[in-house]
Amino acid sequence: MNWVRELCDLYEKNQTLAGKVERGRFGEPLILLPLFHTTVTAQITVTINHEGVFLRAERVADEDKITIIPVTEKSAARTAGIEAHPLCDNLKYLSGDYNDYTVSEKGKDYSEHHRCYIEGLEAWAKSEFSHEKVRAVYKYLEKGNLMKDLIACGVLLTGEDGCVLPKEKIQNVAQQDAFVRFCVEEEWDEGRNLLREGEDRIPNECWLDLTLQEAYIAYCRASVTQVGLSYLTGEWTSISYLHPKKIRNEGDGAKLISANDETDYTFRGRFINKEEAFAIGYEDSQKAHNALKWIIRRQGRNWNGLCVVTWESDLKELPDWCLDTDMVCDNYEAWEGWGDEEEDRRYAGTDPREAARFQRAIAGYEKMMDAGSQTILMAFDAATTGRLAMMECQQLSTSAYLKNLKRWHEDCGWLYPKYKDKSYYRYYGVAGVRDIANLLYGTESRGDMALKGSAEKMSGEVCKRLLPCILSGRPVPQDMVNLAVQRASSPVSYESRMNWDRTLSLACSLVKKKEIERKEEEVWTVALNTESHDRDYLYGRLLAVADRIEYRTQDKEESRETNAKRFMNAFSQQPFRTWKVIEERIQPYKMKLAAPERRHYEHMIEEICWLFQEGDFEKGDSLNGRYLLGFHNQAYALRNRTEEEKDHE
């Protein structure tokens, strides 16, 4: 798979969106950047007229700080050197009077910064690809009194010496290092101000003006002087060796492609110079990186540094691989607009109906896909702050993606408790990847399971390990299964019954999946298997009956753990010896039950014991995860007996 080519195709298919500010999943700005542009965080908006006369200035609200600006190849990658942006920049670049109103500890002179900026702006303003807003900004800034104007209107605060105060003295509000953007108001006469019907008004904001963006793109293309061979397309074009950052988020300084070490060991023994190592066309690099930034912000998932993004080749809706079954169904039904929440809740928790609900959602997605539809998945992580690594890169047919996803949810299908929208219910399926990480490695916090501190890194590790299991059908890691069984076997270590219920369901899911991987023909469901002779399964059933007997004698307000749960961990290690202890301890609770109910549970224990194969009951081996399947199946059956069964008993 040529991932750069795939990203370039994504950009070209959605090029009509370039430069337009939309809103993402959480209300944040979502921008497909135009070529030769980037985004910055602006602190000050300066408004001038088309003649370059200062009108006003104001601080930018936090929700509106993300700003599109034109950049050069070098200014987009600048760190400590002097490289000016073409139009909007920091005060030290824009202000001709910057040194007059600032105090540098080392007496540094910033006149070179302003000279570098004004020369670049002048070249653009006087070229054939100029724009009226560019000329207005140039007319204003060549006067060299930006700092004076900002101080006069109260945007910058000064001390007794008349110099701008550092941000440390005014609650870290950007002062000397503030980034400035421009707004150019047009003063049309009455005739020119009339717009034709259907004509769009050109915005005054420079960062929203598409005509200004197009003018800069044309200016950059006309300014190309050196060309080289692009290894991506095989064409002679402008080559880039400085590639963009801000890939995963606006504060991300890691680069995906970089080769800036020309003095040490980068090329030794392989290439003479970086041109031999790799060469990518500047526009192709811009398209690929801009498309990657956009698709990550649009539908990517972050896992404590690990970023995973999946999309369909035509950007059609896909079920998210990392969500739980209930959310996959909810998203499809909400998107389709026909989901009946009350109806869904009515049969929530019943195996066949819930399975049918998920199958209906997957079938709906399949119906909307074209025959040649492809799904692309990329995962990125950074070991250092400057280098970004591609951890995973897959391209598979969308039909295969949906098939693998369907298999994961069905093979791991189990009853899960869930609390949402102030209601408690159960769904049939599998937990989401983030929930799995929390249940396996998290601790209880405010009634929920969550990862804390350094343990947050485990969410990314769990994602890396489960990703091939979900999308490629690889076996579930055995250590995860063992850990889930171990945690589910210790209910007394949980403060919340809900958290233990969720952990128990996860353990049953993973054990079921592991059993299917070992024996394809074996079927495990939530329904109680009264014909099974499996030793582990039968011991789990016995434990559930003992738990139910004691629970039936408790008051509604009583929250004491039953003997079955208190001895559950020991029972999983030495079931024969521990069962004797549990059976003795539940005798007083048996006697509290009505005679018919007591006889019913005694007969049930006898029936389960008769199902053991000769020698299995007294065997000293510890139990495997199948005992949790038996425990959950039997407990669920006891809780959900029909009225006919109760009357018969």
Image (tube, rainbow, N blue to C red):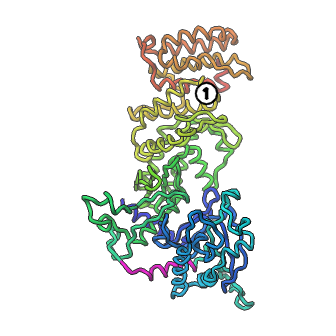
Q: Which residue is mark 1?
A: 494
604, above or below 139, in the image: above
> Which of 166 and 412 lies nearest the eye of the viewer?
166
Local secondary structure at mark 1? loop
Asked if residue 562 shows in the view, the reply is: yes
Residue 225 lies in the magenta stretch: yes
Q: Residue furthest left?
A: 269
Q: Please tell me which residue is depicted at 66% across the width and 81% down the height of the picture.
A: 198
Secondary structure mostly taken by the magenta-highlighted segment of the chain = helix
645, above or below 291, in the image: above
44, above or below 478, in the image: below
Q: Please tell me which residue is depicted at 52% across the width and 12% down the height of the picture.
A: 578
The magenta segment: 211-226
> Which of 433 and 110 lies nearest the eye of the viewer?
110
Q: Please tell me which residue is depicted at 44% across the width and 83% down the height of the picture.
A: 222
Q: Is residue 472 left or right of residue 362?
A: left
* Residue 208 found in image quarter: bottom right
| Residue 149 image offset from top left, x and y in percent | 70, 76
Residue type at mark 1: give it: Tyr
* Quadrant, the N terminus: bottom left
* Residue 407 found in image quarter: top left
Count of numbered badges drawn on the protein = 1
* Quadrant, the C terminus: top right
Residue 56 lies in the magenta stretch: no
| Residue 35 image offset from top left, x and y in percent | 49, 72
